[in-house]
Image: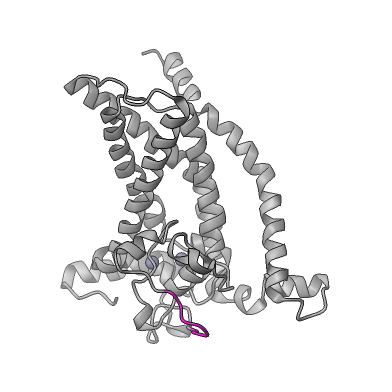
Amino acid sequence: MTLQALWESIVAFYEPTLEIFSLWAFGLPLFVTVLAVMFIVAQKFETPLTLRSLKQAAFPTDQYDHASSRVDMWNGIILLALGFPLVGIMAINGLAIADNVGAYVSAEYGARAPLITSTWALVAVQFLVYFLSVDFVGYWVHRWCHTTPILWHLHKPHHTAETLTPWTLFRQHPIEFFGLNIIPAVVGGAFTGLVLYATGSQIQPGTIAAITTTAYIAFFVIDVFSHVHMPISYGWMNRIVLAPVMHNLHHSMEPHHWDKNNAVILTLWDWMFGTLYLPKKGETWRWGCNDEEYGDNNPHRTLRGFYFDPFKTLWRHVKEGESSNL
Ligand SMILES: [Zn+2]
Ligand SMILES: [Zn+2]
């Protein structure tokens, strides 16, 4: 394959996502407006509606003017600068893996006759299989981050947050952000490839567009929104899809809340595998890791501690076989 042909095939593969990027540019102002309206409604007009009260409701100083949220913001800016299109590209790469695995298995064992012929049904099946398998693996990777001591050293920085702002989503150690987050796309993509083989089909352009859109909506609306300081609940839907209050509780430092609500998008997995915790009426909690590593004793209070402390604790763990501080 010539370089020119390789380039053309890459462009052809990624082309549908360009439309999605421009869609996102228009979607952002809409998203911010919806957020603002929700904050006003949530405040129930308890204070006179001025720009200042709106700003205080949406961005309270106790959350935003805090060492913890400053670490979140600066790390977030660095991560986004390094890999803003990561989410979409990761979703697309998972589909590329699916396509390759499907083609490889077909070449090895012989292509199967197409099981589904209508395009919309193909798109629906491919979308559901890929979306559900990536989210399912995402749930388990997150759960293992809590239960496997070595992974916990890398995930712990997310849990030393003492405040919640949308930036807290990006409070992820770079190794976790760029390393662990790829696992669901790879495993989910490989599984989808097997389904492609079984159904005798190939990835449809409609699936690529649907998955990219969903990846951005899920990432920005569900996951960014799940890190706002307000415990917004979706009622009975809390068992199905991640509401802010559910992930809010995942950040609780109360021991009986630890390792609960591991969902990335669907809380359905927590419900199915026994890690769902629906907050009780009037239940409150503090955000953080534990009492010993709080405030001035928080090892991730500065960016330097945030980046280097996980390596130190991981090294100590490997060297001394020390049990992790879960
Ligand atoms: Zn976690
Ligand atoms: Zn979080």
Q: Is residue 278 left or right of residue 81?
A: left
Depicted 145 relative to depicted 220: above or below: below
Could you tell me which residue is drawn at 38 percent across and 51 percent down?
A: 135
Q: How is the image coloured?
A: one colour
Q: In the image shown, does 177 or 128 lie closer to the viewer? A: 128
Q: Position of residue 39 (x, y in %)?
A: 68, 68
Depicted 296 relative to depicted 113: above or below: below
Could you tell me which residue is drawn at 71 percent across and 51 percent down?
A: 29
Could you tell me which residue is drawn at 31 percent across and 30 percent down?
A: 196
Q: In the image shown, does 283 or 252 lie closer to the viewer? A: 283
Residue 149 within the segment the image draws in magenta: no
Q: Is residue 24 left or right of residue 237?
A: right
Residue numbers of the magenta segment:
278-284
Tag count: 0
The answer, for residue 303, to whether it is visible in the render is no
* Residue 5 found in image quarter: top left
* Residue 320 found in image quarter: bottom left
Q: Position of residue 296 (x, y in %)?
A: 47, 84
Q: Quadrant of the C terminus?
A: bottom left
* Residue 197 found in image quarter: top left
Q: Position of residue 114 (x, y in %)?
A: 32, 22
Residue 283 within the segment the image draws in magenta: yes
Q: Is residue 277 left or right of residue 53?
A: left
The answer, for residue 114, to whether it is visible in the render is yes
Q: Main secondary structure of the magenta part?
A: loop
Q: Quadrant of the N terminus?
A: top left
Q: In the image shown, does 320 or 79 lie closer to the viewer? A: 79
Q: Position of residue 204 (x, y in %)?
A: 44, 27
